[in-house]
Image (cartoon, rainbow, N blue to C red):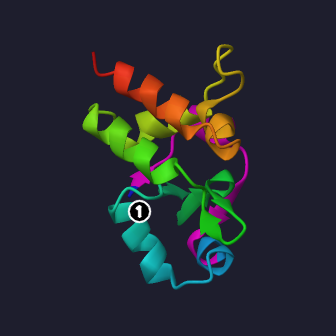
Amino acid sequence: MTQIDPETDALVGEWLTLREAAKALDTSPNRVKQFIRDHKLLGFIRAGELSIPATFIRDGEVVKGLPGTLTVLADCGFTDQESLRWMFTPDDTLPGAPIDAIRADRGTEVRRRAQALAF
């Protein structure tokens, strides 16, 4: 796992530790690590502990549309840190940040924009 840079950390805001994320998803910490390996979630080292952005989890599940978007960004050559920064950077044309649009069930538009980054 990668250490989070302070600028990206500030963009994200609220984080969950590995154990908190596992509890929120009603699963084991090992399963959360598998979600990270499978690009269903992103995890970073913060204050010496593996952490996940809190907005990636809602109602006991990974936010719908997030895994597909993370896969598209990885396929475009984005690192995990670049993907995270992109997901949380406000975009006036959405409006809001891509993660806000995904949480508002507008993931298709977000993935379309992510795919365009590859060209």
Vertical arrangement, residue 58 with respect to residue 107, above or below:
below
Q: Is residue 12 magenta?
A: yes
Residue 37 in the figure: left or right of residue 66: left
Depth check: give the residue in front, 50 or 55: 55
Q: Position of residue 71 (x, y in %)?
A: 35, 46
Depth check: give the residue in front, 84 or 39: 39
Disc 1 packing (10 Å; few <14; some 14–19; many ≥20): some
Residue that label 1 marks: 36
Q: Position of residue 58 (x, y in %)?
A: 70, 62
Residue 114 in the figure: left or right of residue 53: left
Vertical arrangement, residue 97 with respect to residue 54, above or below:
above
- Magenta-highlighted residues: 2-19
Q: Position of residue 25 (x, y in %)?
A: 62, 75
Residue type at mark 1 is: Ile
Quadrant in which the C terminus is drawn? top left
- Residue located at (65% from left, 14% from top): 93
